[in-house]
Image: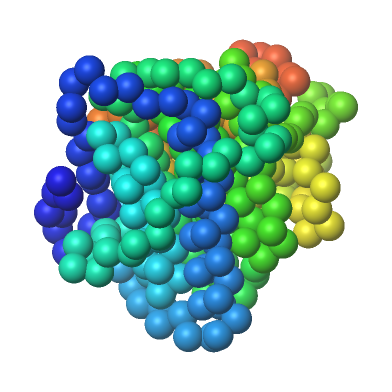
Amino acid sequence: MLSEPAAGGPETSHGSAPGVTVDLRELLAVSVLAAVRGGEEVKRVREGNVLNAKAKGKTREGAEEQLTTGDLLSNRRMFYLLKGAFPAVQINSEERVDTADQETVSWDHSIPEDIKQKIQPKEVPAESVTVWIDPLDATQEYTEDLRQYVTTMVCVAVNGKPVIGVIHKPFSSYTAWAMVDGGSNVKARSSYNEKTPRIIVSRSHAGKVEQVARQTFGNKTVIIPAGGAGYKVLALLDVPEKNQEEADVYIHVTYIKKWDICAGNAVLRALGGHMTTLTGEEISYTGSDGNEGGLIASINMNHKALIEKLPDLEKTSHK
Ligand SMILES: Nc1ncnc2c1ncn2[C@@H]1O[C@H](COP(=O)(O)O)[C@@H](OP(=O)(O)O)[C@H]1O
Ligand SMILES: [Mg+2]
């Protein structure tokens, strides 16, 4: 059953049915499909140039948060695909879905060949699963027609741990997926600059991130401002895309929502990397939808040493 969130607020659909199990490999297949099908809507709306962008509110820091037809149509497709395939699972998505306007896309139970080859079936209790949907990451940049930053994302958490991540780029039809203790279609780069890392940061919700990065790694540190949490995680990986910048570390210091970061966290974890709060705590993907402690993400680096280098974040993390 769908809950009734406040108008314009995010969607939460509660799972129930104790004793029911779901197969993580099937969840991965549907997550990939949902990200791709949502991405088609994102692309169609952008190319048709009828975004109907409006303000849906403000962040804590006072930045205007935009909502477009692309967000809503993508959300509707992604949500109903996943909900239809896995009715017993809790799904949290960034946008509200209108129950009077259900999408009838259904999953045909097929699993793509590459997933079949790399991943074994794995049953888990439905009640241990939380799915997080971001139907359009980098909405701000989408409205500015900076298409390279835009992604659609799905994340599956089991007992709060991010286990499956899908990050899809609708405008270049690139999809990265990974499952912890399973497999992936993406890998880490062969080397990273640990001494003077290139730091990728938010261009529209930066807060004091540049100050933190320079204090940590010195004034000469290269800082790459970019849109989208999905894009910034892909910047740490080996992604065969001409419009994808590369970086060594991703840092975010302001408040951020779990649907923005869960998929990237799962992908990094599956590949041996890390995404934690700025004090090094793991982020739990159940319960509340917000992450208060900022984030730092890295792969094939000494993550603990990076955190120890960060300045006193009590003063900087939430500002
Ligand atoms: N301080 C903040 N409060 C709320 N959301 C934030 C935020 N900082 C970043 N985000 C969200 O996190 C995503 C990545 O941010 P950024 O591009 O600035 O790095 C964006 O998601 P959406 O585009 O899905 O809304 C953005 O809105
Ligand atoms: Mg988002």
Residue 253 is at least partly visible in this image? no
Depth check, front residue: 163 or 119: 119
Residue sitting at 59 percent across and 16 percent down?
A: 181
Residue 265 on image: x %, y %: 54, 31
Looking at this view, is 60 or 9 the one in front?
A: 9
User: Residue drawn at (58%, 26%), measured in percent from left and top?
Assistant: 179
Residue at image x 47%, y 26%?
A: 24
Residue farthest along the bottom direction in this orientation: 49
Out of 45 and 230, give the one closest to the viewer. 45
- The residue that appears at 18% across and 27% down in the rendered structure is 17
Image coordinates of residue 148 in percent, x first then y, are: 68, 62
Q: Judge from the rendering whether residue 71 lies leftward or rightward of residue 196; answer left or right.
A: left
Left or right of residue 58: residue 293: right
The correct choice, above or below, for 137 with respect to 300 in the image is below
Estimate the x, y position of residue 90 in percent, counting from the top left: 27, 36
Quadrant of res 111: top right
Tell me the quarter of the picture where residue 197 sits. top right
